[in-house]
Amino acid sequence: MDILIVTVSLILLAVFLFKPKIGLYLTAFFLPVIGFDLNLFNFAIPPVDLLALILLISFALRYLFNFFFEPEKKIELRFPLLFPFAVFLTVSFVSSLLSADPIYSIWYFCRWPLFLYLAYIFVPYNLIRDRKTLKNLIITTTFSAMIVLLFGLLSLVGQDISDSFFRVRSIAIFNVYPFGENHNLIAEFLNIGAFFLLTLRVLAKTDKLKRIIDVLFLVSFVTIILTFSRTGWIVLAFQSFAYIWLYLKDRKINKKRLILPIILCILMLSPFFFKMGNLQSDNISSTENRWILTEISFKSFQDKPLLGQGSGYFIRLVEKDIRFRAKYGDPIDSHGILQKVLAENGLLGLLSWLFILLVLFKEYYQAFVKYNKRAPWLAPLILGSFGGLIFQLLNTSYYKGKVWLPIVVTLLAIELLNNKKDKENNIIENEK
């Protein structure tokens, strides 16, 4: 098996050296496939991370070759979100050095936050230089979300609708859950994909295609609701209200006429609210589980408030907690980026992470204010990518490409809009 993986990896490396965009599209397509690992010489790595790693290596080799042998072809490197990420990575690295097990902590730092920036932020940002590549990447990411949607709907087949735990969930293929076992992982990627669909709707050139996208969006919307993921509902509500407000903001529409459709919509969704109430009353353990994780985070923060226990240490803290192990068994990672960073990297880590969010929000807000009227596709792109990040306040994909590559796509769309010199940089051809 090791030889097979190495052989395929070398073939992909050769392909990506000459056709790096193929690697970029493959990475985008496999973003949600995090439910199983490839074992390479006792090192476990998800397929999407292996693709991203090969693409990173190929990018580095191409850059070095051009630097030494073809300097006229050397590209100017770009470092998105450099300063806020540099601050966070520096704090994370220092806290790792000071942890009880520096080797373990430094390895975690390199494997997750550092790899995240290099493979899913830095490399894609430097590979995408034109409108066509960006548009293809949006399409590929959305298509991947639609596959997740299909698998989610297939999970309803055979379920008893009267069962209190009837919901959209992950399904296994040959005993493997490609998108992960938890239903939250389905909702998480659909929260991104649903609003990317709205971007593609603006880009669509025919009414027929627009109608197909409308149907897919509505099905995605309902599917997120049917996951009965609390976080999915919260994020979807935020995205929906924000999109409605942004859509109506500069349009002269009688707001009173919206009251009846809103009431009808609430009445139609009321059975789902009732179902969610029953579901949560039968699922108290999930809430208690997260509360205990929060307590573990706060106690560890009190022990080392400035720089925390070290990157990757949260799961070890849970492993040492007798109450959690006795009640829930195997240790799990933090369900929320803020409590994880607070425990692992202390107050400085938390402030540096919030700094990343603040800079990102500022970029999004300024772009929306500047381009909303002439680039109506931008708002759903922003809401889709930002929704995936908000999801991580209560989930575990904070250092994964499925969250950050859509953010890079949005940042690149904003950069192309900012570039007024090259008309080919307009993501939408008929943009005024």
Image (cartoon, rainbow, N blue to C red):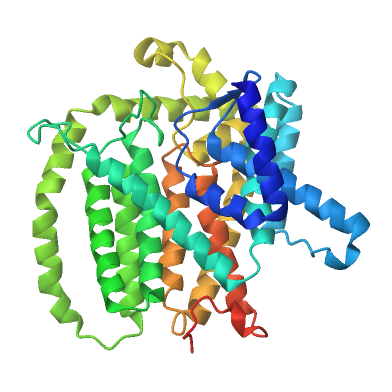
- Residue 239 is situated, as x and y percent measured from the top left of the image, at 35, 60
Between 337 and 17, the one lying in front of the other is: 17
Counting labels gives 0
Left/right of residue 167 with respect to residue 236 in the rendered view: left
Residue drawn 23% across the image and 55% down it: 219
Residue 227 visible: no
Is residue 64 positioned above or below 349 on the image? below
Q: Quadrant of residue 293?
A: top left
Is residue 410 positioned above or below 372 on the image? above
- Residue 118 is situated, as x and y percent measured from the top left of the image, at 69, 47
Left/right of residue 275 with respect to residue 246 in the rendered view: left
Between 38 and 413, the one lying in front of the other is: 38
Residue 241 visible: yes
- Residue 329 is situated, as x and y percent measured from the top left of the image, at 40, 13
- Residue 175 is situated, as x and y percent measured from the top left of the image, at 36, 23
Residue drawn 38% across the image and 75% down it: 202
Is residue 212 positioned above or below 141 on the image? below
Residue drawn 24% across the image and 49% down it: 223
Between 210 and 106, the one lying in front of the other is: 210
Is residue 16 positioned above or below 317 on the image? below
Q: Quadrant of the N terminus?
A: top right
Residue drawn 34% across the image and 42% down it: 186
Q: Quadrant of residue 307?
A: top right
Q: Quadrant of residue 110?
A: top right
